[in-house]
Image (spheres, rainbow, N blue to C red):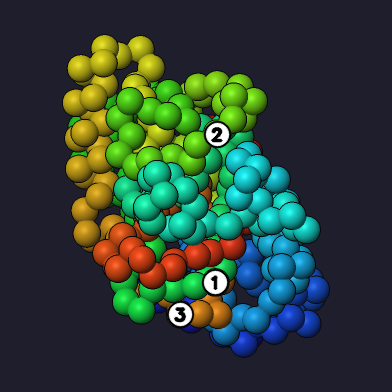
Amino acid sequence: MEVVKNDGVMGAEVRGLDEAGIGDPETAARLNRALLDHQKLCLKDQALDDRAYARLARVFGEPKVQLVEKIRLEETPEITLISNYNDMAGGKPYVSANHWHTDDSYFAVPAKATMLYAKALPSTGGDTQFINTYAVLDAMPAALRTRIEGLKAVHTYVSRRAKSLVQNRTDEEKAKTPPVTHPLIRTHPETGRQSLYINPNRISHVEGMSEADGDALLDELYAFAFQEKFQHRHKWTLGDIIVWDNRCTLHRASNDFDLTERREFHRILLEGTVPV
Ligand SMILES: [Fe+2]
């Protein structure tokens, strides 16, 4: 197995990982180290069935059984189907999550990492893009950073500031996700590095600030964070499994393709810890 760093701000490719390697402790340690070092890995040329994929996920952490029941796979409920044909837009194909976000931040304990396994890809486009939020914080002007030290933001499933549609949920599912607060700067529990922790799709306001002041601050942070120089782009090939660390990255899906073509992934989220 070989780990090859991508050009640019983040990411590495893992070549030569086979199914036998999934059970090997030394391989597991190398993969976890590589994820901490590079924030996102692409495991190339995989041909795993659902159970083997779920086993691979356990190399990186503990899979979460996900909230929205209707998109879970029956036999392996830790896997959900992410598809532009999941009905969010009244029967029309739609790419959700096409604005910058980090997964699961509307939970008190958000997922530490996310895995996607490509199952169907459009003939062109449909990349997944990333931002390295360690790099964002490292490059942030001191004056702006000082203003956000110690501040917390309120994250909700349906935010008044959200730009993407979110999966419809039952009342019972809604009851499980009251608003939560998270710090705007978080410290990674494994690397000890600090990053900007924002979720433009879920943050409704900054705690203790007026809506107008909070909105102005969030707009300023987002404009800084979304700069091209902090971005990495994943161009999909069938057989790719990617895994990324939600504690130090943002991501979004591109909807720049013929939406009648299918774009589908099997997703697994891994248990995290309370952001601090
Ligand atoms: Fe996402």
Against 165, residue 76 (above or below) is below
x and y, in percent, of residue 57 in the image: 69, 62
Against 50, residue 187 (above or below) is above
Residue located at (25% from left, 40% from top): 222
Q: Quadrant of residue 28?
A: bottom right
What number is the disc on residue 249? none
Q: What is the C-alpha distance between the residues marked 1 and 3?
A: 10 Å
Judge: label 2 CB < 8 Å from ligand 1: no
Which badge, 2 or 3, comes first in the chain's sequence?
2
Residue located at (29% from left, 68% from top): 257
SS category of the residue bearing label 1? strand
Q: What is the C-alpha distance between the residues marked 1 and 2?
A: 24 Å
Classify mark 3: residues with Cα within 10 Å, few (<14), some (14-19) or many (20+): some
Q: What is the C-alpha distance between the residues marked 2 and 3?
A: 31 Å
SS category of the residue bearing label 2? loop
Which badge, 1 or 3, comes first in the chain's sequence?
1
Which badge, 1 or 2, comes first in the chain's sequence?
1
From the image, tell me which residue sits under label 1: 119
